Image (spheres, rainbow, N blue to C red):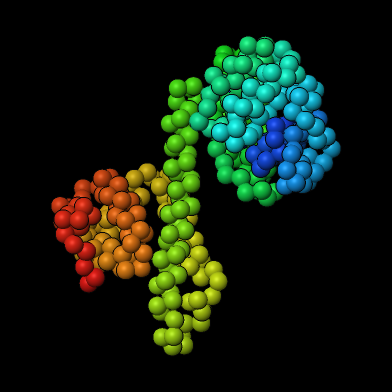
Amino acid sequence: MTSPGIANWPAPARLTVGIVSAGRVGTALGAALERADHVVGAVVARSPQSRSRAARRLPESQILDLAAVAARSELLIVSVPDAALPTVIADLARSGAVRPGTIVAHTAGARGVAILEPLTALGATPLALHPAMTFVDSDDDITRLRSACFGVTAADEIGHAVGTSLVLEMGGEPVAVAEKARPLYHAALAHGANHVVALVSDAVAALRIALEQSAGEGFSAIDSDPLASGVPERILGPLVSAALANVLELGPSALTGPVARGDAAAVAAHLAALGAADPDLAETYRAMSLRAAARTDAPSALIDVLTGSTPPRGDL
């Protein structure tokens, strides 16, 4: 996917790339850059899992130490856990291996280019390139980069042009994110993606309990085993997928269900059932329902149920 007006952006020269380290994100970016004819010459891979991943995704790259990878790289991708980033940057600066003119790009979502100052002072070109995508260590990681947006932060127009070109070459869509906006940008992504995982996991758990309560009813017309593996996921899958597609297209107006209808009795029954199954899950439902109600013209009776002014009842 390319952004309007920059489809013909000039590609950078072929670069020798170094990856620090061979995690899910770093190796996916390395593989995507190699598809664009850059060369990943070397990677840092210390754990057995990282070495295995590097061998699988970047089989022609050498596994070297940090200074050696930096010394031979024109583009250095620093893709380490956020908490480790300051230490790795400090180690690179102390090593003296980063040459002036080296493009150094980190992938931390909440950080901009200020954290790269020790390397910028040595003449490096700093970039923050964050792919707005989840990585699960499968071949899909690399494929998904072609449809992902990247948050791009640079120190100047030259850096922004370089970052934009690299993202386009990987098949992604570059989106400029200001240095000061990086924490909010990353919080939005974490809230939207990570919390969906927690939310759907809770829904699967509650649905599994409901199906367990339904087992043994003896309705022979229903062929599927309610306790069979994957039944809750198959029930929820189409519903959740449709809800996601609808909200991305329609915004908050896509909201449906008892909160959207202002059905206080149904919500009270939900809270009672969830409280019996898992009190923590009931509180999560209550909090999310309050957020949903804030986007509707919710009646006072519903707000009273959600704030605890009216105790939940088990009858509809």
Answer above or below: position of 22 versus 17. Answer: below
Q: In this view, does 41 lie to the left or right of 238?
A: right
Q: Give how far across and how far down residue 260 sits, in percent.
A: 27, 54
The residue drawn where x is 23% and y is 55% is 306
Q: In this view, does 32 lie to the left or right of 279?
A: right
The residue drawn where x is 80% and y is 44% is 55
The quarter holding residue 167 reads: top right
Answer above or below: position of 286 versus 23. Answer: below
The quarter holding residue 47 reads: top right
Answer above or below: position of 114 versus 233. Answer: above
Q: In which quarter of the image is the C terminus?
A: bottom left
Q: Give how far across and how far down residue 144 sits, in percent.
A: 62, 44
Q: In this view, does 224 lie to the left or right of 264?
A: right
Answer above or below: position of 185 versus 303. Answer: above
Residue 89 vs residue 164, the one in the foreground: 89
The residue drawn where x is 47% and y is 88% is 220
The quarter holding residue 170 reads: top right
Q: Give how far across and how far down residue 211 sits, in percent.
A: 43, 74
Q: Give how far across and how far down residue 125 sits, in percent.
A: 65, 16
Instruction: Answer whether residue 10 is visible to the viewer in this image.
Output: no
Q: In which quarter of the image is the N terminus?
A: top right
Q: In this view, does 51 lie to the left or right of 281?
A: right
The residue drawn where x is 54% and y is 75% is 228
